[in-house]
Amino acid sequence: MKDDNICGKGIWNVKIWIVLGLAFSLLSQLTNLSTRTPYWLLEFIIYALMLFGLWANSKFSLRKRICIPKSAAPVVYIFLVWGLGMLYEMTLTVDGTGIGGVNRNTLASFVLAQGDYLLIAIFSFWIIRKLHLSFREAFFLAGGKSLTEGLVFTGVLLKTIISPSFFLSPLVLSYYTLVYASFIALPLLYVDEELLWKNAKPKPKRSIILMWIIGFVVALAIRMFWGLVYAPVVTRLFNLPSN
């Protein structure tokens, strides 16, 4: 059986957000050639995995054909979220001298990043299990989590909204959503989402705004824990260099 409605309809169609996010990503790559890492192509490989997964599920219901025991599905999902997050992290750099978006030093950046990606993976699984989320709902849950970065911590989205280039805001929002969905929602194209649910009974679909709110609140709590507890403790424990 095909997953005909995996992407949704109208303005909340996942394909629209992916196209807009890809457009902004390509534009960013063309304007930041000097600060990208040698592994910058990994970002587009991850996006290609998402596009392939959408196509394969709409045509052949791929995730239903991949046999994963229900008992192993949570571990597989969490590992995929973490692994894809690490691949994306390899495309980031603070100033072009190291790899990773947290610290100029590559090792320090990846050590510090664990406190973010592991918690995001675990809590994403818990929310999907508790609320019986679909791929589409997880996609926008990821968008809500991305808002903590776009609006609060880096403020790129907020700065765009209040700038003369405010018309680019939909592209920026779509890009942040795509980035976070590329490791939070993407695994659900290869791991049947129902294997993660607490029971087989589907729950009523929830609004995208609610997904944004839940994602934002959870990610904000994770980032506060990271900044107030994890990063200071790990930096001191391993004597990591500061930025």
Image: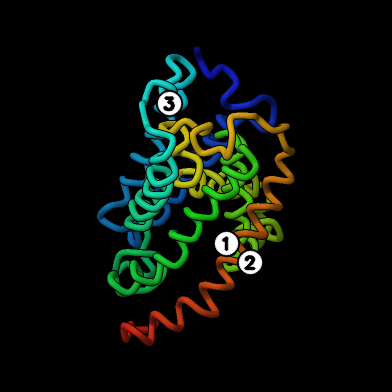
- Residue contact at pointers 3 and 2, CB within 8 angstroms: no
Question: Which quadrant of the view contains residue 154?
Answer: bottom right
**Foreground tag (3 vs 2):** 3
Residue type marked 3: Arg
Q: CA distance from mark 3 to mark 2?
A: 35 Å
The residue beneath circle 3 is 63
Residue at the image position 48 percent from the left and 48 percent from the top: 179
Residue type marked 1: Glu
Q: Is residue 12 left or right of residue 44?
A: right
The residue beneath circle 2 is 152
User: The residue tagged with tag 2: helix, strand or loop?
Assistant: helix
Question: Which quadrant of the view contains residue 160?
Answer: bottom right
* Number of numbered discs visible in the structure rendering: 3
Q: CA distance from mark 2 to mark 1?
A: 5 Å
Above or below, comparing residue 89 to residue 115 in the picture: above
User: The residue tagged with tag 1: helix, strand or loop?
Assistant: helix
Q: CA distance from mark 3 to mark 1?
A: 30 Å
- Residue contact at pointers 2 and 1, CB within 8 angstroms: yes
Where is residue 206 drawn, in percent x and y? 72, 37
Which label number is shown at residue 38?
Answer: none
The residue beneath circle 1 is 149
